[in-house]
Image (cartoon, grey):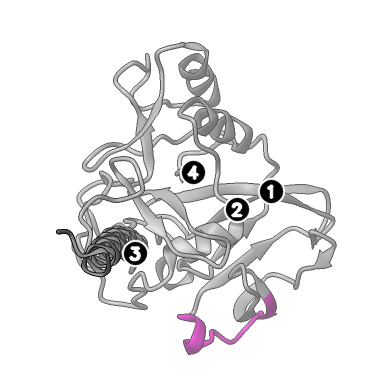
Amino acid sequence: MKNPILNKRASWLAKRTLVVIIAAIVLTSLGIKAGDNLLWTASLRGTTRQDSPCPDNMVFITSPDGGFCVDKYENSPGPGCPYQDPQNETESQINLDSPNCLPVSKEISTPWRNVSQSQAALACARAGKRLPSSKEWYQAALDTPDKDSNWNEQDCQVKSNWPSQPGLTGSGKDCVSSAGAYDMIGNVWEWVDGTIFDGQHEGHPLPEQGFVQGVDDEGLAYQTDLQEPAPNYNQDYFWIKQQGTRGIARGGYWGNGSDAGVYSAYLVVPPSFSGTGVGFRCVK
């Protein structure tokens, strides 16, 4: 004869066991998801996980806005471009008129120069990217070694210290930021997004030309001195024309010496200017 009390207890134990099993599965699942989230967060900081959130030849820059990817190298014309080393703005435009021409971030390549600020913006857009803001450029450049003398082939090229001028991208193995971006100082100036008008940037007046004595959160000078270099700012120099519309280039080029650097900026030429010492890189 069946015992109803025992049967009821057995049913209760079975239900309790089922609840415990389901809870264990849920907790295990949550633990796996939490672990995945931790691994992904760590990958954004450049640790633990090998897959990067950025495409090839870009590096991730952490920022309060969530971070972004920046080209690891100064951009060069891709294999689909008619001119691999444009010698003037017209040749750059012919490249941009070619549907198969894309800028590339690639080691040991000739930087794309003789390109105006607007052309550089178009080239980045063609690749599904954009020119960095001045602040983004500064964040990507931080901790790039900024020597003031005795440059060699491993350093950033600021004193014609590589075999060619400009040099091939990534030639200075020590010229790399803490985030992993090469050639942020020297080799060629790099266009960034934005302009100034009559000496003002986003409504704020900029100082006169001179050695950098203080910078804002974009790494742009708010104080300069015409005579005295500042060791705290690596003797970097700030060039500006106070009248008219001027494009913004950062970092310096192969002939600037100690004037080049993370805090160095060139706000002298209009956005339509193109020259042998100015190139670009992109972000996304």
Instruction: Check disc 2 and report the residue beneath it.
Output: 133
Residue 132 vertical placement versus 276 (above, below) = below
Sequence-first disc among 4 and 1 = 1
Picture quarter containing residue 256?
A: bottom left
Picture quarter containing residue 46?
A: bottom left
Q: Nearer the viewer, residue 26 or 56?
A: 26
Mark 3 neighbour class, 10 Å CA radius: few under 14, some 14 to 19, many 20 or more: few
Highlighted magenta segment, given as a residue range:
222-234
Q: Circles 3 and 1: CB distance less than 8 Å?
A: no
Q: Circles 1 and 2: CB distance less than 8 Å?
A: yes
Instruction: Check disc 4 and report the residue beneath it.
Output: 284
Sequence-first disc among 2 and 3 = 3
- Visible residue check, residue 90: yes
Q: CA distance from mark 1 to mark 2?
A: 7 Å
Is residue 254 shown in magenta?
no
Name the kind of residue labelled 2 in the image: Ser
Name the kind of residue labelled 3 in the image: Ala
Q: CA distance from mark 3 to mark 4?
A: 27 Å
Numbered mark located on residue 66 in the image: none
Q: Circles 4 and 1: CB distance less than 8 Å?
A: no
Instruction: Check disc 1 and report the residue beneath it.
Output: 194
Instruction: Give x and y (percent) for residue 9.
Output: 26, 69
Picture quarter containing residue 222?
A: bottom right
Task: Determine the residue positioned at 40% across, 61% down.
Answer: 185
Mark 2 neighbour class, 10 Å CA radius: few under 14, some 14 to 19, many 20 or more: some
What is the quadrant of the N terminus in the image?
A: bottom left
Residue 8 vertical placement versus 109 (above, below) = below
